[in-house]
Image (cartoon, coloured by chain):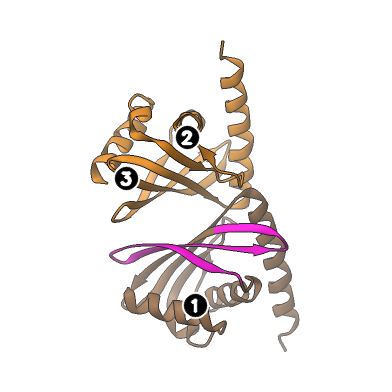
Chain colours: A orange, B brown
């Protein structure tokens, strides 16, 4: 777990998604803070997580880390267009890879703001694909 | 921490808020999933947590528990009017009492539903006060 978290933090600090794909298990599941239905598979998880990385601003920082066994909860704060975002990345690791990644955000205004920004980013990423 | 969690779980299982007040530190802070501003002090925390206990339905259950030191994250699921709610109670304990209680909820639809129900419950509680 600690190795995965170290890789995750160094990736987030660098602002690059290099190494992210290798960190995700083939059957990884991503649970969005906005939509109920999980995104299944490494490709979808990678798309969401790399989009999120671009959407979150330069003042993004982790403020609390709670780790037990194969589960980690990383609490973060940041701002988006003056909206204060507070959330958690809930990460489950198996055999040195992330198998489950769930995000929750508060307050309500922040969920709406992240929704708006993520929709725009995923749309832009789709449009830029050949 | 484990003693506090045991008390919390037995209270949630009984559906009663007996013992809740004693479990909260005088300077306890409650962070709502809906509103940014924290609710400070034991009385406000008690009001929110006991209202929440009444709002959440009989199918409320905890599905994951991540504990490290003085911090615990309890993940739950339930339904409200057919809306699936998934959330976390993030609890910080000091000297055997809860000093910080933060709730986050997903997906967006669930945050809206909890908002609606909590507003109605807090309004009803205020109206019933002498």
- Tell me, for residue A41, which label it has, or none: 2
**Crowd around label 2: few <14 · some 14–19 · many ≥20 (10 Å):** some
Q: Residue at x 39, y 79 (%)?
A: B6
* Horizontal side, residue A44 vs residue B70: left or right: right
Distance CA(mark 1)–CA(mark 3): 40 Å
- What is the magenta segment's predominant secondary structure? strand
Chain bearing mark 3? A
Q: Quadrant of residue B39?
A: bottom right
Residues rendered magenta in the picture: B59-86
Q: Residue at x 71, y 85 (%)?
A: B129
**Could you tell me if residue B24 is visible in this image?**
no
Q: Are marks 1 and 3 in contact (CB under 8 Å)?
A: no
Which one is in front, B120 or A81? B120
B14 w.r.t. A87: above or below: below
Chain bearing mark 2? A
* In the rendered image, residues at marks 1 and 3 fall on the same chain: no
The quadrant the C terminus of chain B occupies is bottom right
Was residue B25 drawn as part of the magenta stretch in this picture? no
Q: Which element carries disc 3, helix, strand or loop?
A: strand
Q: Position of residue A82 (x, y in %)?
A: 57, 39
Q: Which residue is mark 1?
A: B42
Which one is in front, A40 or B87? A40
Distance CA(mark 3)–CA(mark 2): 15 Å
Q: Which residue is mark 3?
A: A94
The quadrant the N terminus of chain B occupies is bottom left
Q: Which element carries disc 2, helix, strand or loop?
A: loop
* In the rendered image, residues at marks 2 and 1 fall on the same chain: no
Q: Are marks 3 and 2 in contact (CB under 8 Å)?
A: no
* Horizontal side, residue B15 vs residue B90: left or right: right
Q: Position of residue A30 (x, y in %)?
A: 49, 41
| Of the image marks 3 and 2, the number of the one nearer the N terminus | 2
Q: Residue at x 47, y 68 (%)?
A: B29
């Amino acid at each position: 777990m600690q190795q995965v978290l170290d890789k995750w933090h160094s990736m987030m600090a660098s602002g690059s998604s290099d190494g992210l794909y290798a960190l995700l298990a083939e059957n990884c599941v991503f649970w969005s803070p906005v939509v109920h239905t999980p995104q299944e598979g490494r490709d979808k998880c990678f798309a969401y997580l790399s989009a999120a990385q671009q959407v979150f601003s330069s003042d993004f920082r982790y403020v609390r880390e709670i780790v037990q066994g194969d589960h980690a909860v990383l609490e973060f704060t940041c701002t988006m267009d003056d909206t204060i975002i507070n959330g958690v990345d809930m990460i489950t690791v198996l055999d040195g890879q992330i198998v489950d990644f769930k995000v929750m955000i508060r307050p309500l205004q922040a969920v709406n703001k992240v929704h708006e920004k993520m929709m725009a980013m995923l749309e832009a990423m789709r449009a830029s694909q050949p």
